[in-house]
Structure formats: structure tokens, C-alpha cells
């Protein structure tokens, strides 16, 4: 199961976030991302502002409850579409949906504690050219 630190203790840390992407463990990543304890992946199933069932499936691939599932929806908290939420509920969990800044801070704390967690994060401004968003360090 993914979601736990690798034996070498490498943890993914969000250093900062902004309109186009993230700085994660010192590396710049553009666009939406999926975070696992020792892994960063592009979140390819995100379409515009919509988070559908395929985005939910991609987010939790090989990750099952009782772990924590965080979803950062950009500058403000947006409710994912019913396909996303319905799929999560059929799998037995409710995602914790929040603004991306809050999700980054929550991720950093939970990852440091060694908690079983996965996060899907949209940049502060998503999709590109959408409403202007802020960005900063999640500390």
C-alpha cells in the first residue's frame, strides 16, 4: 500500500504553492499534483475546475481507508462534483476538501507525524488563466 514513508525516511514536503504549481521538497512542479508520503505524481485526470470520478480514482489508486484523503481546490474551498464525492463514498471514505493553502499545511503536519495520508492539490490559480489566486509558503 502506498502512503507510508519509504525505509529511507524520505518524506514529501510542500515548500510553497502559487498560481501555476508548487515547490515540493525543493523541486518545482507545475499543475495539479498527487502527494504520497515519498512520491509526487501529476494529477492528470483533473479537467478545468472539475474533479470527477476519474480524478478521485487516480488520487486514491492503491491507497485505501483508514488513511486520510486531502483535496486542495485552489485559492478557495470548492466542492468537488457529485461524481467525485459519490465515487469516494462508494469506496468507504469522505475526502477532506479545503483551499490549497490549508491542504498544504495539513499535508506537511500529517506527513511529518507519519500519518497515512494522500493529497490531491490544485494550484492556487487553476485552470491556468482562471481567477487570480495568491500563493505562499504553507508554514
Image (tube, rainbow, N blue to C red):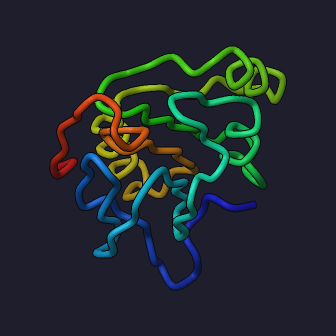
Front residue (pair 57, 106): 57
**In the picture provided, is 89 more to the left or to the right than 42?**
right
Image vertical order of residue 56 relative to residue 36, above or below: above
Q: Position of residue 106 (x, y in %)?
A: 35, 41
Which residue corresponds to the image point at 70% horizontal and 26% vertical from the top-left? Answer: 93
**In the picture provided, is 32 more to the left or to the right than 23?**
right
Q: Residue furthest front?
A: 129
Q: Position of residue 80 (x, y in %)?
A: 57, 21
Which residue corresponds to the image point at 22% horizontal and 48% vertical from the top-left? Answer: 138
Q: Position of residue 30 (x, y in %)?
A: 40, 61
Q: Position of residue 132 (x, y in %)?
A: 23, 33
In the picture, which quadrant includes the N terminus?
bottom right
The picture quadrant where one finds residue 5 is: bottom right
The picture quadrant where one finds residue 64 is: top right
Front residue (pair 110, 38): 38
Image vertical order of residue 51 relative to residue 65, above or below: above
Front residue (pair 95, 133): 133
Which residue corresponds to the image point at 56% horizontal and 49% vertical from the top-left? Answer: 118
Amino acid at each position: 500500500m502506498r502512503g507510508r514513508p519509504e525505509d529511507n525516511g524520505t518524506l514529501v514536503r510542500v515548500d510553497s504553492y502559487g498560481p501555476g504549481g508548487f515547490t515540493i521538497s525543493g523541486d518545482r512542479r507545475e499543475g495539479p499534483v498527487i502527494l504520497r508520503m515519498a512520491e509526487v505524481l501529476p494529477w492528470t485526470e483533473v479537467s478545468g475546475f472539475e474533479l470527477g470520478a476519474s480524478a478521485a480514482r487516480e488520487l486514491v489508486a492503491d491507497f485505501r481507508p483508514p488513511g486520510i484523503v486531502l483535496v486542495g481546490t485552489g485559492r478557495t474551498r470548492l466542492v468537488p462534483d457529485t461524481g467525485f464525492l459519490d465515487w469516494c463514498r462508494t469506496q468507504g471514505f469522505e475526502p477532506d476538501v479545503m483551499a490549497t493553502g490549508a491542504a498544504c499545511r495539513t499535508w506537511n503536519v500529517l506527513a511529518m507525524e507519519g500519518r497515512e495520508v494522500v493529497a490531491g492539490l490544485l494550484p492556487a490559480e487553476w485552470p491556468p488563466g482562471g481567477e487570480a489566486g495568491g500563493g505562499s509558503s504553507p508554514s
